[in-house]
Amino acid sequence: MSPRPRTVSDERIFIATAHAITRLGPTRLTLADVAGEVGLSAAALVQRFGSKRQLLLAYVRQGAGMVDDGFVAARAANSSPLAALISVATAMAQGVRSPNELVNLLAFVQIDLSDPDFRRPALAQSRHLLAGYETLLRDAIDAGELVQCDVRRVARALQAIANGSLVTWAINRDGRVMPFVGRDIETLLMPLRTPRSLKRPRSAGGGGGASSDRRVARRSR
């Protein structure tokens, strides 16, 4: 007898998991919170994943692939590699609507840092993010939008500023999060921009397509 087909894909469950983490944090969320969003029962999630911990691990393990998909989609949505770079670098901010939501996301980072099973896939995602930044930086240099630079060092700085700017915004609460993070990204990239790229309107964190940004937003490091 063949197994019954799944009515809800793992992808939809992972999206619901991301929503629950953002809304409740990894400690407070329950399998029922995730299941209710996709029309399943908590028991169905237990049958598929085994436990809440195993669901969260499965969610983390597909993070690197989501990052790669986000880069591909952002590049396809932007003729300018620099615009795609800014779009992806500000993507995390699109997943944060309040300081409390950022607190919930940072609680997941604490798990990534303290639990070896979570840290391994988190490290893989971080490496994929850096590799994606480096590729777009090289593309922007080749397109004449940025001057020659050490793309690895700039990619690391970009990652640090994109994440750190979110924390600074949550403390200062100065305006809306997307422009706040976008300005910091622009400050980093401004000295690297060529006169040609400076003539174009600058993006403050948009233009990459909302769906592609959200792929990166939920698990950026």
Image (cartoon, helix red, strand yellow):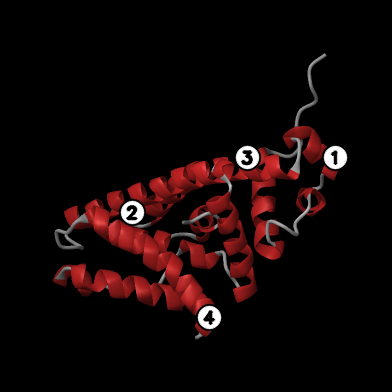
Residue 207's place in the image compared with 18, above or below, is: below
> Which three-letter amino acid code belongs to the residue tagged 4?
Ile
- Mark 2 vs mark 4: which is more N-terminal? 2
Quarter of the image that includes the N terminus: top right
- Mark 3 vs mark 2: which is more N-terminal? 3
Of residues 106 and 62, the one nearer the viewer is 106
Q: Is residue 41 visible?
A: no
The nearer-to-camera label among 3 and 4 is 4
Identified at 76% across, 28% down, the residue is 5
| Marks 4 and 1, how far apart at CA | 39 Å
Residue for badge 3: 58
Residue for badge 1: 43
Residue for badge 2: 133
| Marks 1 and 3, how far apart at CA | 17 Å
Q: Is residue 9 left or right of residue 130?
A: right
Label 3 close to label 2 by CB (< 8 Å): no
> Which three-letter amino acid code belongs to the residue tagged 3?
Ala
Q: Residues within 10 Å of mark 1 (few under 14, many from 20)?
A: some
Q: Is residue 24 left or right of residue 181?
A: right
- Mark 2 vs mark 1: which is more N-terminal? 1
| Marks 2 and 4, how far apart at CA | 27 Å
Q: Determine which of the numbered discs, if any, sits on residue 171 in the image.
A: 4
Classify mark 1: helix, strand or loop.
helix
User: Residue 60: x percent and y percent?
Assistant: 58, 45
Q: Residues within 10 Å of mark 2 (few under 14, many from 20)?
A: many
